[in-house]
Amino acid sequence: MSATPFDLLIRNGTIVTAQSTFNADIGISGESIAAIGAPGATAREVLDATGQYVLPGVIDGHVHFREPGLEYKEDFASGSRAAVMGGVTTVLDMPNTIPPTSTADRVRDKHRLAEAKSYCDFGLLGLVDQDSIEQLEPMAEAGVVGFKCFLGKSTGDIGPPDDGRLLEALSIIARLGMRCAFHAENDAILQSQVRRLQREGRTDALAHVEARPVIAEVEAIQRAALLASVTGAKIHILHLSSREGLAMVEHWRQRAVDITCEVTPQHCFLTSEDMRRLGSIMRINPPVREPGHGAALLQALAAGRIDAIATDHSPHLASEKIRDTIWEAVSGFAGVEVSLRLFLTHGHLTLQELVRATSEAPARMWGLYPRKGAIQVGSDADLTLVDPLVEDTVEAARLHGKNNLTPFEGCRTRGAAVATIVRGHLIMKDGELIAAPQGRIVHPGLPTGETSPRAIAST
Ligand SMILES: [Zn+2]
């Protein structure tokens, strides 16, 4: 029996994985989980988790930390600070920065700048657009976690590749064994609807919902999945917003396309009725829908038909968000810090279902499991400790990003992250940031962590 003390011991907590819930201590050596169940073990540091749940670290697979180029909205230090305060241990950052992440050199540049200041681990998505095809393989070698394609324009105004280029891109991505995420909205439908509504003189918030109808989402999923089915590429649908979109995902899943999807708190919990009340602050792409879609998405999430929860954390200045004319407002708002709290309170999910959606599923879909997304000996010691009883109210003024405007302002929550551990480093405890940034890049090329069972240390 080894007498070597652990570096960190999580004592008296209830471990929750996607498969099971049980009481055991967790011993951490260096940056990895060294033991699960270690009676009598000693450690340099002990964290008492009595009354708390110990979850595999939350992965937010969809954030925009805005760096490089849009640092006035957010940067990797502020975005990752908000992430760890909300219990998030790994984020995947989207490529619509300035310049966009569309070449191997830009991947390396973003890797360097993020590693210098990120409090959580991070993966980078490379851009698939009309001109980046030759860069897909070099970007994979430079360490992207996967790719992203905008079929409809959003922040950054990045246009979709034509179908020929997209088919070519998916062939390459299939050969690389990687996954391509889609902003799934048909751009031509959006453009023509906006023109029609503007001709009619509409400037109200709900015109934005009308301008981006469900059919735009359904058509884009259909096209992406059809091209995936002939190329064998793995694909992922970002921020799924409608019942019909889900039906199209399931249609292709039944035809053996490897298609995963995610939902955001805003598409689950907010509707066009909220937007009527709150106005342009709620402008997002795709838009919130009429009442009914959110409840259906939540049910599908609980059943595992929707794979993951992600936030699409997209901060902007309040002055960019709050406009009388909806067309002048930008799309997106902050979310990485409050998502876990919102789903704990309003998600109607068991903790095991929650863990599957916040950690295991995103780790699996991006090729990071079981280094990430698992509580196993040999996995990275990424842990989110949750106190199920702590009550709070969402207040932008107390959040930790650069621009925290949120339509969930005033929303009561019950249950929250009270400690965040990233690769063995206790970064957040009781709402305080207590360690320096130590975030590192993640991608499927890394070794996936030791999975063979090992003797449990005891004295
Ligand atoms: Zn996004």
Image: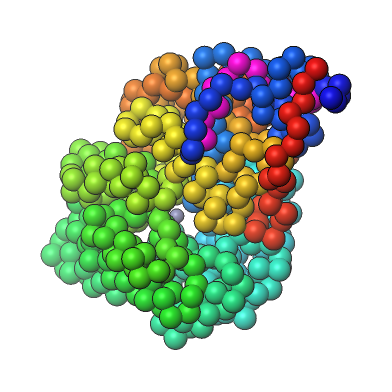
Residue at 66 percent of width and 69 percent of height: 139
Measured along the vertical axis of the image, is residue 200 above or below residue 81?
Answer: below
x, y percent for residue 432: 61, 22
Q: Is residue 286 left or right of residue 108?
A: left
Kindly give the residue lying farthest to the bottom in the view shown.
164
Q: Position of residue 133 (x, y in %)?
A: 57, 79
Q: Which residues are magenta?
A: 6-17
Name the chief secondary structure element in magenta.
strand
- Near-viewer residue (71 or 260): 260
Residue 164 lies, with reference to residue 72, above or below; the image says below
* Residue at 62 percent of width and 47 percent of height: 370
Q: Is residue 241 left or right of residue 119?
A: left
Q: Quadrant of residue 303?
A: top left
Residue 338 drawn above or below residue 419:
below
As drawn, the residue found furthest toward the left would be 200
In which quadrant is the C terminus drawn? top right
Q: Look at the image and tell me in which quarter the N terminus lies.
A: top right
Question: Which quarter of the frame holds ligand 1?
Answer: bottom left
Q: Is residue 311 visible?
A: no
Colour mapping used in the image? rainbow
Nearer to us in this view, 192 or 354:
354
Image coordinates for residue 170, horizontal then vertical, percent:
50, 76
Residue ID at (61%, 36%): 375
Q: How many marks?
A: 0
Q: Nearer the viewer, residue 144 or 408?
A: 144
Q: Could you tell me which residue is drawn at 44 percent across and 40 percent down?
A: 335
Q: Is residue 157 within the magenta segment? A: no
Q: Up-down: is 319 above or below 242?
A: above
Q: Looking at the rendering, which quadrant does residue 109 occupy? A: bottom right
From where the camera sits, is residue 352 visible?
yes
x, y percent for residue 148:
50, 65
